[in-house]
Image (cartoon, rainbow, N blue to C red):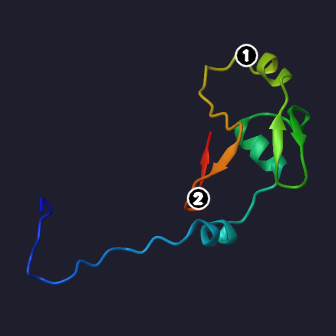
Amino acid sequence: MGFPSTNDGPVDRPVTPPDLSIARAASLKPLDEIGAELGMGTHLLEPYGDSVAKIKLKAAEELADRPAAKYVLVSAITPTPLGEARPR
């Protein structure tokens, strides 16, 4: 009840691939290339392996003349009962 119904049969909807399939299909860019796209040198990146890096705190001082920006801080990821991860 409350849902529109038609007698035209089932509605075709695009199938969204699972997260793991999306992640495996992605190609990672080198960290120095990502830093260059953001306009910061590699001296401001603290690499953790080949595909993860933190931005050093001194970047705030060096980039202070730029317009203010927003960022998202993910401190932990907690699995839900369905096995999906959600940021906390």
Front residue of 57 and 87: 87
> In the displayed structure, would residue 66 be above or below residue 32?
above
Kindly give the residue lying farthest to the bottom in the view shown.
9
Q: Left of 35 or right of it: where is 73? A: left
**Residue 14 image position (x, y, % from top left):** 37, 74
- Dividing the picture into quarters, in which one does residue 30 lie? bottom right
Give me the residue at 11% from left, 82% from top: 8
The percent coordinates of residue 56 (x first, y second) are 85, 29
Residue 79, x across and y down, in percent: 63, 53
Q: How crowded is mark 1: few (under 14 residues within 10 Å), some or many (20 or more)?
A: few
* Dot 2 alpha-carbon crowd within 10 angstroms: few under 14, some 14 to 19, many 20 or more: few
- Label 1 is placed on what type of residue? Ala
Q: Classify the position of the N terminus by image quarter.
A: bottom left
Q: Residue at left 67%, top 20%?
A: 66
Residue 72 point in image, percent of width and height: 62, 34
Residue identifier under label 1: 64
Q: Going by the picture, which residue comes out furthest to the front?
A: 81
Element on which disc 2 rests: loop
Residue under the image location 71 percent in, 43 percent down? 37
The circle drawn on residue 55 is none
User: What is the spatial separation of the Cα atoms under label 1 and label 2, in whole angstroms?
Assistant: 37 Å
Secondary structure beneath label 1? loop
Residue 57 lies left or right of residue 13; in this view the side is right
Identity of the residue drawn at 67% across and 33% down? 73
Q: What residue type is labelled 2?
A: Glu
Pick the front one: 86 or 36: 86
Q: Mark 2 points at which residue?
A: 84
